[in-house]
Amino acid sequence: MLSRRSFLASLAAAVPLTVVVRRAHALAVAHLESDPATLEALAEAILPSELGRAGTLKVARELRDWGAKYRENAELVHGYGTSRLRATGPTPLTRWTKQLDDIEAQAQTAHQMRFRDLSVAQRADVVRAALQGQRLDRMPSVADANHVAVALLAHFYDSAAATDLCYGAQIGKQTCRPLSASSRKPLPMIKLRER
Amino acid sequence: MRRAVESDVCIIGSGISAAMVADRLARTTSAKIVVVEAGDETIPLPERAAQRERFLRYGENPWGRDHLDGYEVEGPLQSRSMQVGGLAMHWGGVTPRFSPEDFKHRSMFGVGTDWPISYDDLDPYYQEAEELMGVAGEQGPRELDQRSKPFPMPALPLTYNLELLKAWASKAGIAMWSQPSAKNSVAYRGRAQCCRNDTCSPVCPVGAKYSPDFTWNELRRANKLRLVPRTLVRKLVLDPSGKTISHAVAVDRDHPEQPVEFHAKLFVVAAGYTWSSHLLLLSAQTGAPNGVANASGLVGKYLTGHRNVGGFIELPVRLYPGMNEQHSLVTKQFMRPKPGSTFIRHDLRVWESATGRTPRLTDDGGALMLGDAILDDWRARTKTGTARVRAYYDVVPDRSSELTLDTARKNEWGDPLPKLAFRDAPESVALRAQTEDSIRALFADMAKAGDGKVLRTSVDNFQDHPAGGCRMGLDASASVVDSWGRTHDHENLFVVGAPTSVSGSCANATLTFCALSLRAAHEIEKGLPRRT
């Protein structure tokens, strides 16, 4: 059976580039759908523990969905003061799947175990090694994240849920909310065990 | 073979100024109205929620293909967007009025040029525009915020954050109030109440923010006009006398091989600050060698707008960014200096902000954070808040602040594209540093009043709310149109909205463009059959 990389290489030799890119994206989507365990284990290692397992699985699922619905060369919102048009770049999914493969390989090399079977601390160490030397500071947008681990973080921390978790308040940014409620201090978050 | 379209009034462009004129004429006259738009139909309201979702997730343009290919223009074009509804499909919906001083710079401060109209002349048309669009606003202190009638809608409520920031501004001696906005604080004319989606610009998913498509949909449903999209007007043709416009020549983008002519008694150019002057210049012909309406040589000249100084101020108060982040406080306190004083004028707005308080990947020492560390770090940094402050200030335009035809760049039909250059008049050049220093000093004073500190300031060189190019005036040798928007050279040709502005004030200008357009419409309707 061909490895993913071999498959891509043979594909590239046989068909036009746009078709290769489209197929590579589809292949990456299928890869993440059929084997989400590494991404899920990654989410558990790098997202806040307050989310719990269900919460981290949800973020991983949302990121997969984000990736699956990504469109290359889509027109970006117009900037003011310029006539230059910009478009979305190549799919990040092919990069993400390779990085997940690399994480698995690193887990095998360092611990002779699958990434998902490592402790959270061990998994975090693998991620730190993978991000070594990368320029990191601000949280980028998901599309601009240069590593799947950063993309996961970016996806979560851009969400209304993350903001509410940080502030301990029901702000609900960028959601449809009653105008009349805006004058009062946002209500506190309700902890699960209090429900 | 040519195709001819006949009407009483031909409006060129379908942006917000065109919508104002069309709405007025459709209400008060029985004239046959045709509107010609180069761009496509816009995205319908029911599709905007999905489009917004993709904007939020991927940064995609929520308005589809809202541009013409090949229009890469030299100079600061405000936006490539070209569609039914124009730029106001993605405007922020912010609608302050100018102040009385805006119309009298020369007589009050000895700089720039007085308008041929006063604030009082424009007041009823401001009101008409506010009622047509639906503006939610709060009456500011009377001595700062003059108006003869109440806003049509109650103000958008101040959020918890803005209430705290208003109290802070008050400590700094600044009276601030809710920024007037064309956003529904209550359901209005069949459109929904605002529900704080936070994406007013570029897209309101519920229709609470006014955009011109609502006017076009209403007028088309009532069969009160015909709107012709995907049709680019390339030239206005004079009749043999040279005094009036005979017809407009256009290209139907779907059938470019078949030229279209629009014949009308009256022509209204409502194509914004760029495309209005551009069309007049493109229309050079025998009898008008420098373009139509251009005997003064001033078509395309005196482009105007306003620059801004912005900043972020850290305050020892906990804010909750995201409550209604595009809504702001405003004051006109610095727009109304005494006559004879130095011409330093600016508005001031204050917003909630998350700047400096967003999650990050590395700590202060540059070490990577993962897991709980990122959230813990974020929580620690959000115990205090940040205010965004910004002041638009006046720029007096120079004659050489101009739109010209760019012979090096042409569109696919062979017409030269416009070239834009904004330039300050010498008095503005002389005042620039002092103005910007004064604004930065104000920000520092505000920070001090709140026991906070200025995190950073910056100057945006882009002149926002660009206007001019067909400035109004009483003297035909020093202006392109009269105070009603009628061109001095051609009795049946009007230019309306942004291009007719003499100066750009120091506040968001779209409402003023609308008021000017409605004032023009009142003049235009005099020559048309009244609706019975």
Image: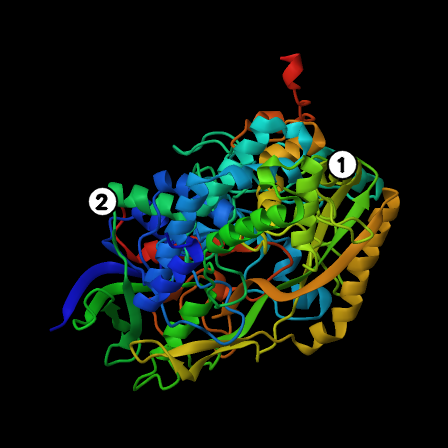
Q: Pointer 1 indicates a residue of which chain? A: B
Question: What's the colour scheme?
Answer: rainbow
Give the labeled residue for mark 2.
B223
Nearest the eye: B361 or B177: B361
Image point 44% across, 82% down: which residue?
B406
Q: Pointer 2 indicates a residue of which chain? A: B
Image point 65% across, 19% down: which residue?
A190
Type of the residue with mark 2:
Asn
Nearest the eye: A38 or B448: A38
Location of the N terminus of chain B (image quadrant): bottom left
Q: Label 1 crowding class (10 Å Cα cut-off): few <14, some 14-19, many 20+?
A: some
| Position of residue B94 in the picture relative to residue A2 (left or right) | right
Q: Nearer the viewer, mark 1 or mark 2?
A: 1
Location of the C terminus of chain B (image quadrant): top left
Which quarter of the figure has residue B366?
Answer: bottom right
Type of the residue with mark 1:
Asp
For residue B156, say whether it is visible: no
Residue B320's tag is none
Nearest the eye: B41 or B398: B41
Give the labeled residue for mark 1.
B376
For residue B311, say whether it is visible: yes
Disc 1, SS? helix
Vertical placement of B276 versus A143: above or below? below
Label 1 – label 2 distance at C-alpha: 60 Å
**Could you say where residue A161 lies in the image, as x and y percent from the top left?**
60, 32
